[in-house]
Amino acid sequence: MADLHIERIAAVLVDYSVSVRQGDLVQIAGGPIAEPLIKEIYRLTLARGAHPYVRILLPGLQELLLEHADTSQLEHVSLLDTLFVERFDARILIESETNTKRFSQSDPSKQVIHQAAGRELKETGLLRIASGACRVCWTIFPTPAYAQDAEMSLRGFEEMLSKACFVDQEDPIAAWREEERSQAQVVQYLAGKRELRLVAPDTDLRVSIEGRAFRACAGTQNFPDGEIYSCPIEDSAGGHVFFPFPVREEGREMRGIRLWFEGGRVVRESAEQNESYLTRVLDTDAGSRVLGEFAFGTNRGVQRPTGNMMLDEKMAGTVHLALGHGYAEAGGVNQSSVHWDLVCDLRQDSAVYADGQMFYKNGRFLIGS
């Protein structure tokens, strides 16, 4: 990426997303390919009087763990991860994959064991985020692997990412504050509503949101960001939904996912590709067949699916549903080691109703200024 954009991204992350303060313990984590961004975040963190701790994540280590570890090793929870989650004031986590299909030959049963082992620590981390004890932001560094998945050149992917992060604008932080204002209008409209109905091609799904709050996301927990989310009542989902975009989970790609809900749970599932792995994920634990999130994407810098969920779930004109763990700050109580986002395209022949009133049509809200 152009040096100017690296500097702008780092400045937004440090001064806006996690608001680094003097004396903070700050984790900065990413792969070697993200070195330019890691260094700039490190420099700015020092300039703010905080204490940065860098963790470089070497490619290939997780694959070695899944190939050679026994069950006790798979169930072991890293003491370093525990320290970062339980003690640090701020964390900037940079996704920087050089091979997005690296787990394609790993044993999926081992992946499930390892993922389930981190459930308690994940819950601790989410509670600390919800309480404000720790500010965490996940971001992405443009790599050739991400560009290939998106079927773009690396330069094209970088330009798209810059627009999605608003760093192509003179004052990115001001732009994110304006995005927050726009999202607040939707949050206000949905306050007090009882039921949402989602209608789209091969989709008709109802969920209860009675008593649940919607939350605006404008660059403080993800970067790029752009979503408005809540947690449905756990036993309320009924109907069926189709997810047309490819989904990658632990290096495996699934396409054409369809889910059928009764009483809040997935009672039937199918996929045009990798259906057996879809079922394995859904059977991870007691909460993995329950909806933990219902969210609208609002970022118009992301205009087509990229194969990267951090970007795809933010795409304006979509809704994403997450199976598994719910968010306490939005009233969610479902617990699971899984939180798996799936994106539904609403840009054509689609609508969302709140208590029977259409407020969203073909990818756009019908409310607000």
Image (spheres, rainbow, N blue to C red):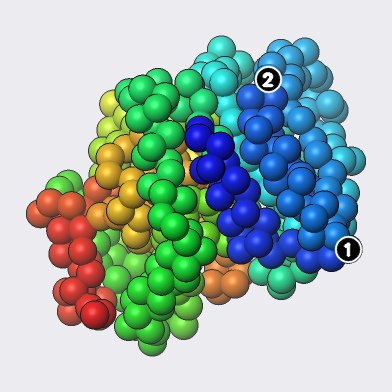
Q: Residue at x 48, y 78 (%)?
A: 213
Q: Give the crowd class for mark 1: few <14, some 14-19, many >=20 residues within 10 Å.
A: some
Instruction: Report the mark closest to the observer, 2 or 1.
Output: 1
- Of labels 2 and 1, earlier in sequence is 1
Q: Residue at x 65, y 33 (%)?
A: 36
How far across and down, in percent of the image, does residue 14 sit? Answer: 67, 56
Q: Nearer the viewer, residue 190 or 289?
A: 190
**Amino acid under disc 1:** Gly
Q: Is residue 234 above or below residue 113?
A: below
Number of numbered discs = 2
Which residue position is annotated with label 1? 23
How far across and down, in percent of the image, does residue 317 sit? Answer: 25, 55
* In this picture, residue 300 sits left or right of residue 45: left
| Mark 2 element type | loop
Q: Quadrant of residue 325?
A: bottom right
How far across and down, in percent of the image, does residue 1 sit? Answer: 51, 33
How far apart are the alpha carbons under marks 2 and 1? 31 Å
Q: Residue at x 85, y 28 (%)?
A: 72
* In this picture, residue 135 sits left or right of residue 237: right
**Amino acid under disc 2:** Pro
Q: Nearer the viewer, residue 195 or 327?
A: 327
Q: Is residue 195 above or below residue 170?
A: below
| Mark 1 element type | loop
Q: Residue at x 36, y 34 (%)?
A: 306
How far across and down, in percent of the image, does residue 304 sit? Answer: 28, 40
* In this picture, residue 358 sits left or right of residue 60: left
Which residue position is annotated with label 2? 59
